[in-house]
Image (spheres, rainbow, N blue to C red):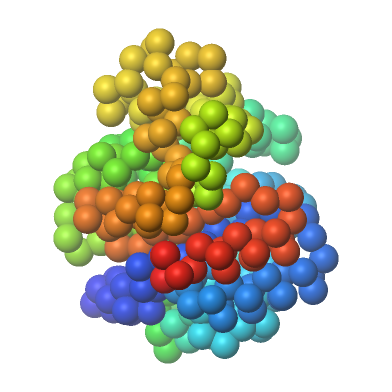
Amino acid sequence: MMANTAVNEARRRLGRVGVGLMTPLAPAEEWRNAAARVEKAGYGSIWVNEGVGGREVFTQLGVMLAATDRIVLGSGIANVWARHPATMQGAASVLADAYPGRLALGVGVSMGFLVEQSGQQWTSPLRKMREYLDGMDAAVESAPVPSVPFPRVVAALGPKMQGLARDGADGALPAMMPPEHTRRARKLLGPDKLLIIVQAVIPESDPATARAVARQTPTLTLPGSPYLRALKDLGYDDAALADGTSDEVIDACFAWGDMAAISGRVQEHLDAGADHVITTVFAPDLASAADQFEQLAPALV
């Protein structure tokens, strides 16, 4: 019942489109200002990420929750390598208790080389996540009980992790994938689980310029990238995924063009079964990101 309540409440509060603010470091006042601007523009959510060290995600969410009135704040992702599972459960529960209905918890395993850079030993992502979710569940009774339960979604690209997201959480949070991936994920999850996807958008109509911007991200070229594995599962061959990937792959993973084209890609994900689409932009700082989201709002909100 609690899981159903969390899913239903999240669907009601999130709306169709949110934003991801992924700038690594910035003063707290800049985060407050950007969050307030995004909320005023009408988006349903703001999501922030974390590695291990640096910007700690629950502290960050607390700053932004306090600076806004109604928008949902989400972790996309809270890194399972950054804290004990009981601490994850406790931190999320405290924020959800303080701000009823305004927290969404996305958890993820990160990538092997990033984990090892933190001094920890990488292990099976699926086993790590399964054990971590079990640890969170074991800590529920010792954590605060929010009046509105928060949804817990798992960063999941492949079918095994999506199966775990279905069976051990409230849904899945895939990123950087074409609408066909969304359609397959919805089929695997079934109708009763959340499917929140991340879509990078580039408001640029020149193909060469837009693709050059897209290729600035290392997501598709990192060693052992799970995104490349997921794209292979969708049918892209080695030639398409080599040397920074082909234009076809870039066009499938990044939404670029005018407002109508970007809005159309978001709608494709919604039509394929997504409950909510988190849009991200390429920006050097939070103020620039907020500028872009305000300009995109008439087409997306």
Residue depicted at 29% across the width and 44% down the height: 179
Q: Is residue 211 above or below residue 187?
A: above
Position of 133 relative to 128 (above/below):
below
| Front-most of residues 88 and 191 | 191
Q: Is residue 90 visible?
A: no
The image shows residue 116 at horizontal and vertical percentages of 67, 31
Question: Seen from this angle, which residue lies furthest front?
Answer: 206
Quarter of the image for the C terminus: give it: bottom left
Quarter of the image holding residue 233?
top left
- Which residue is painted at 69% across and 47% down in the image? 52
Could you tell me which quadrant the N terminus lies in? bottom left
Residue that lies at the very extreme toward the top in this rendered image: 239
In this view, the residue in front, 133 or 273, is 273
| Nearest to the observer: residue 263 or residue 154 | 263
In-front residue for pair 252/183 = 252
Residue at coordinates 58% horizontally, 26% vertically from top-left? Answer: 222
Q: Position of residue 262 (x, y in %)?
A: 41, 52
